[in-house]
Amino acid sequence: QVGDIVEGKVATLTDFGAFLNLGGVDGLLHNHDAFWDKDKKCKDHYKIGDVIKVKILKINKKDKKISLSAKHLVTSPTEEFAQKHKTDSVIQGKVVSIKDFGVFINADGIDVLIKNEDLNPLKKDEIKIGQEITCVVVAIEKSNNKVRASVHRLERKKEKEELQAFNTSDDKMTLGDILKEKL
């Protein structure tokens, strides 16, 4: 039944996943459904005979295929990140890759995208792998396991906080104060 949690024994390992024997019928644990880390592969982490707890995602009776997931039995790294950080919170991470469209930093175990337009005042061509970057979380997409951040918005946030601090301080000067000093 879809949604059931069952145990399956690894029968075959392939480049795209593992076939598990579920007691008379085989199911496919595809690499992308096995791990939250998209670079991990079943053949590198399991061996034939291993027993794995999985969730049944789909049953195609016509083609006699069952799709399985192991990663849906554990909290996604993005969910864990969202529990610690909210939108507009300040984070820090190390640059792990530089792409045409932006820079990825690793913060709390997940890769966070800073798009090119959000890098300002940093200059993309001066950024190096391993460099620490402080930024603000702008979006957490739990359904897609994506997090975006902005250095530019961090700068604007700092300016706003400084302005608020200035406006609430006792050192306010009025136009009358300025005129008195001149007279």
Image: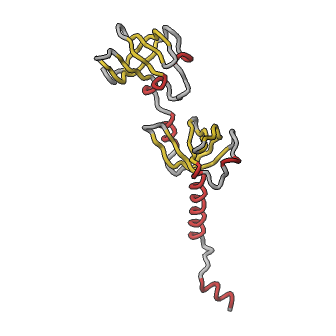
Image quadrant in which the N terminus is located: top left
Where does the image place residue 102, in percent across and percent down from the top left? 59, 45
Where does the image place residue 173, in percent across and percent down from the top left? 61, 79
Farthest-out residue, left = 62
Tell me the quarter of the picture where residue 66 sits: top left
Say above or below: 70 vs 152.
above
Farthest-out residue, front = 100
Where does the image place residue 112, in percent across and percent down from the top left? 56, 41
Instruction: Kindly identify the residue that appears in the image at 48 percent across and 32 percent down.
Output: 76
Say above or below: 85 vs 45.
below
Instruction: Kindly identify the residue that appears in the image at 52 percent across and 17 percent down.
Output: 15
Instruction: Kindly identify the residue that appears in the image at 55 percent across and 17 percent down.
Output: 45
Image quadrant in which the C terminus is located: bottom right
Closest to the observer, 63 or 110: 63
Instruction: Kindly identify the residue that appears in the image at 58 percent across and 35 percent down.
Output: 109
Where does the image place residue 62, in percent across and percent down from the top left? 28, 17
Farthest-out residue, bottom = 183
